[in-house]
Each structure stands twice: as C-alpha cells, then as structure tokens.
Amino acid sequence: MDHADEHWADHRSLLAPPPWIQPHASTLPASGAWRFGDPLGQRQFMRMAVDRAFVLEGGGQLHDITVAFETWGTLSPEADNAVLVCHALTGDAHAAGPAGDGHPTPGWWDSAIGPGRAIDTDRWFVVCANVLGGCQGTTGPASPHPDHPGPYGPHFPVVSIRDIVRTQARLADALGVARWHAVVGGSMGGMQALEWGVMYPERVGRLVAIATCAAATAQQIAWWSTGRRAIALDPKWRNGDYYDAPPGEGPHAGLALARQISQVTFRSDDVFTDRFGREPVEPLAGRFEMWQRFQVERYLDYHGTKLSRRFDANSYLLLTKAMDLHDLARGRGGLESALRRIAAPLLAMGVTSDILYPEYQQRELVDGVRAAGGRAAYHEIDSPHGHDAFLIDTDQVAAALVPFLEGDLP
C-alpha cells in the first residue's frame, strides 16, 4: 500500500462509527416478541376464528387467532361497568402494573389505571388487549403459523384498525360484555376508539379519543413510512424472515432507527432544548470526529435500543401501516356519513405541543361529530411534552376523563 492509499484508508476509518456508541449486537435479540413458553406475566388469552377464516379488510385471511389481554377490577353483575383501554403503537395489553416476569416494563398507563386513579379499578372493570399483528401475545408475525412449522414472518397479511377492533369485539363477547361503558385510547388507541364508535355504535356508551385523528394526513404517513424504510433497508431484516437468527443477527439496527425517527415526533422542540440543549456526550475540545454525540443523540440511541429489546420489527411495519391506512371515511360515503354513525358522546383530547397528531385534528373531529348531529366535547392538554403528554400529564387527562366516565356528557 503506497502513501496515498494509507492516507485514504485512515480517512475511511474516521467515518466508521466506534463500537461504544451502541451496545454489543450480541445482547440484542432478533425479535423482542413475547412467545409461548416465555413467562406469562398477567396475560390471559382468548382464541377465535378456529373453525372459519377471519377475513381481513384488505383481503387477507387468518384463522386460529389468539388475543392476549389483561383485566383489572371486577365486572358488575349487570356487566355495565366495563371500560376498554386501547393501546398505542408500541404498547401492549400490560396497561397497568409493575414490570416483572413476562413484562419488561411497567404498565404503559400505570399512572392512569388503578384504585383511585383516573380509570378507577375499584369502580370499573378495565380491559386492554394486545392488537392483532402485535408482538406481545396476540397473533402477529412472530406467532406460530397454524398451517406449517415456524412463525408467520413475512407471510402475515396487512391488517387495519378495523380488523383490530373486530378482534376486540370477539373478546368482548367472550368476556360477556355486550356494551362497553367506554372505549378509551390515545394515538393508535384513539383510532381504535373512533372505529368502535362507527362500527359498533350500539356497543359503546362513551368514546375517548386522545391525540389522534379521523384519517392519517400526508405528513403522518411520511413519518411512519420513513421508519418502515429504515427497517426494510437493514440487511438483517431478510425480507421479514429473521426469527431463527441468533442474538445480534436480527434487524435491531433498522428497528432502533425507526424508533429514533418516531421519538423525534413524540416530543417538542422546547422539551428537547430544555432537557438537552447543545450538551455533548463526548468532549468536542481538541478534535472534531464524525461520531461525537450530543446528549440528544444519546437519548435517541437509548430509546432505539430499548424498543429493539421488547418489540418486533415486522409488527412495527404492520402497525404503522395500519395507522397510515386509518380513515374513518373509507368505504362509508365520506367522513360526515361515517361520523353520523357515532351514537356515543365523544370526548376528544388534544395536546398543545403535539407535532405528530396536532390538536387541530381533534378540534376538527369534535366539529365534525357535532355537525353530523352527535355529541362531542374537546379538552386541551396544555403541556410541553408533545404527543406523549397523554402518557405523562395524566392529571390533565383525569380532569376531563373522570367526570366524563361518571356521566358528565357533552
């Protein structure tokens, strides 16, 4: 190698990310999906579509579906105190309770669900189900295929929010709940709540839709599609067929990058600036290097790695696609016609600093329901925390949610 080659080899090495930026790949599973044989935690299970196919909105079919769910509180003899809580993209059925065997993290809405909390489990029988296509016990890409050995993997069909709600309706039947007192959800969970109101107007008494929309906008589709491409470009994704890969050989890098992209949309500029500013992790003094990080970059690295330990890349693809497909108007003669089907009063909540599902979408939703002859009210969460404020500022959520559940209707 002559002097020029040595010079360029040295410069190429300066662009290679150092190994200490990320945890060693061998510590990251090919998939963070829960699988049968893992600790059950608080999961319960319901089987459906055993004898006949479950035909999906988009044309695919599934059969012998398992739905994983958790419950809190006690169903009344009249079965009139049931509240369905619908989770967001990377949530699951573990909405409340501590971390432990089978649950790598505490309940995603633990501050809102429990005795004496906003959704009081001394008063309400609370149900949360992992969504169809998810990865924490409900049938999804990591689940065993009923017709041949191994998981579904890349053969799992595209699902919609409407498909998810139909599985929840079957669960309600199995639990003996003919009518939910309320269906509550934020973000993707709010999409499910709205579809409950349109699809099963006679089966829900109240709707609570937080930080969500009647239909995904072009910008929302742009954000989620970028994350999907990050996964698809990871060579270890293997076109979705990676479940037999050893630790470190799955698409954890693509999934982590997808999470980092979305994490930027979950917070606001004020929060990032106040928390991180321009503080570096590795000192900038003396020599600039390509992979010296600012504190905000380390924060994104942390969240990307954290998700790759507990989630599945194929489920991320499916569920973000379901969110992009969300459109109450599709096949229903327009939005006004769809909203006219909603019989239950609606409480919509928006977050002042939400850049992912801006508050104007919740205001338009309320206006649309009212224009269609329904009852609806808007509550604003005044928070700097962005889209995730409904998970953080639960005192503001409770201020509107508690009286709404108890009967203070618009």
Image (cartoon, rainbow, N blue to C red):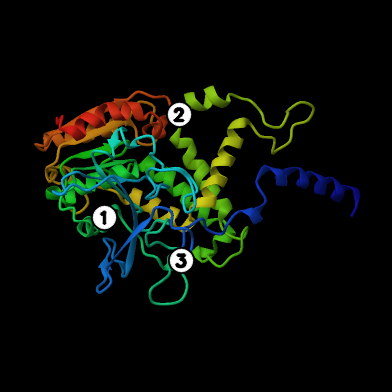
- Choose the circle earlier in sequence order: 3 or 1: 3
Residue 295 appears anywhere in the view? yes
* Residue type, mark 3 in image: Gly
Q: Is residue 70 above or below residue 38?
A: above
Residue 268 badge: 2
Q: Which residue is mark 1?
A: 168
Amino acid type at image mark 2: Ser
Give the residue at x 29% y 61%. Answer: 58
**Front-most of residues 381 and 184:** 184
Q: Are marks 2 and 3 in contact (CB under 8 Å)?
A: no
Instruction: Report the number of discs.
Output: 3
Residue 156 higher or lower than 285, as above or below: below
Residue topped by disc 3: 153
Task: From the top left corner, tell me how far across and down residue 185 is, in percent.
Answer: 30, 41
**Residue at horizontal 35 percent and vertical 57 percent from the top:** 44
Q: Quadrant of residue 11?
A: top right
**Disc 2 and disc 3: Cα gap in Å?**
35 Å
> SS at mark 3?
helix
Residue 223 image position (x, y, % from top left): 43, 43
Quadrant assignment, res 107 = top left
